[in-house]
Image: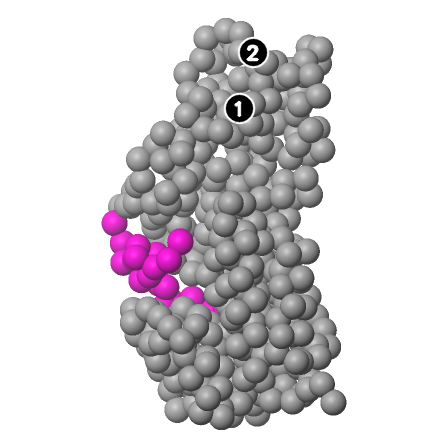
Amino acid sequence: MQENQKLEKEHLAIVTLKKGEGRTIKAGGAWIFDNEIASVAGHFENGDIVLVHDFDGYPMGKGFINQNSKIRIRMMTRRVDTVIDGAFLRMRLQAAWDYRKSTVDTSSCRLVFGEADFLPGMTIDKYEDILVVESLALGIDRMKETIVELLKEILAADGVRIRGVYERSDAKERLKEGMERKKGFIGEPFDTTVQITENGVKYLVDVKDGQKTGFFLDQKYNRLAIQRIARGKRVLDCFTHMGTFALNAGLAGAAEVTGLDISEYAVEQAAANAVLNGLQDTVHFRAADVFDELPRLAEAGETYDLVILDPPAFTKSRATIKNAMKGYREINIRGMKLVRDGGYLATCSCSHFMDYENFTKVIRQAAQSAHKRLRQVEYRTQAADHPILWAADESYYLKFYIFQVCEEK
């Protein structure tokens, strides 16, 4: 393809920050908010690349601007002499792929993780020979097709042929950018159900209608950690979705596994995945509201050697953190009460706004309320293909604990 294709204009508008603002990008982050900007000089359209200057005229780099968004500018480079063109995007994508090859199993993985890969607003997941693209910012959306073609070329150079590309830009966040939600094929249509293998477990992934981009890749190695302690145990997997933790426990030789999810569709998918792995005799799923089911199980006298809590995000904004903390506290109290003395609890939060300190505080409070003592086995975050960029707090969202649960005696 033509790598000299210009993706920015010759004469860029200049954005000047207010004095004392821009602390996030000065620390290494990627976002400039609307209330940090003093002035914009020159002509631009939303989505264009602009130059960013500090209040005193010091050049801070280039990013794309969108007046529809409170995140007014997303930085693409700290070098003002860098041209944002095809060659630049190839460099970013090659670096992202090289990083994955060094850190994770790349058969199915996240190839691009937005700001943490210095391509703000862009997410690309690879499921075997399928790519799923999510574009959440106007500036990067303009570069989408160029990025896809470049990435296919980079993968092909390593012998990885991509059969098809599907777009899942259907998140509500696009509305905040003044864009419509969008999903569909990029290029030729293909069968949107793909079989992947992760940690030895096979899954059928529906990239068209599954949640997010079809599968939650971020828990890959947390699920693997469960395999180490599940052998021979009676396991309860709550909010099981496609049965991922349950199937890892089953593959590891758990004696009995029950998976719960409120979605009938998810339970059907999970059951199909159990059959796919030959685990249908030991791993079972049923549709239930976990908040209602856990007290019922406790009342019936049920106990488990391992309880796994992998709920959806209870909060997606700072305004609802207090209510979310109540939800996390309640679900952890109920989960702990079902763990036999000396058994294990795996518990996590996938909400960026439920930070490490608050999540840890909630678990401590839950243990006190349930009259349990916790021995921490390990603390983990998201898989390395979802890198945490320091100073870009939004890239750190998954918190995952494994505890041994002991009676107070």
Residue matched to label 2:
39
Where residue 114 sits: x, y (%)? 53, 41
Q: Farthest residue in the left direction?
A: 189
What secondary structure is found at the residue carrying circle 1? helix
| Residue 210 lies within the magenta run | yes
Rate crowding at label 2 as few (under 14), some (14 to 19) or many (20 or more) other CA atoms within 10 Å.
few
Kindly identify which numbered label has been placed on residue 333: none
What amino acid is labelled 1 in the image?
Asp
Q: Which residue has dot 1 on it?
A: 34
Is label 2 in a helix, a strand or a loop? strand
Measured as percent of width and height from the top left, residue 132 is found at 39, 50
Please state which of residues 350 and 380 is positioned toward the viewer in this rendering: 350
Identify which residue is drawn at 37% across, 58% down. 211
Residue 133 in view, yes or no: yes
Q: Is residue 89 left or right of residue 202?
A: right
Residue 310 at x, y percent in the picture: 51, 68
Q: Residue at x 70, y 77 (%)?
A: 374
Q: Can you say whether 43 is above or below 390 in the image?
A: above
Q: Is residue 153 above or below residue 381?
A: above
- Can see residue 146? no
Q: Quadrant of residue 210?
A: bottom left
- Residue 185, compared with residue 90, is above or below; it is below
Q: Residues within 10 Å of mark 1 (few under 14, many from 20)?
A: some
Whole-percent x, y for residue 191 in the image: 27, 58
Residues rendered magenta in the picture: 189-213
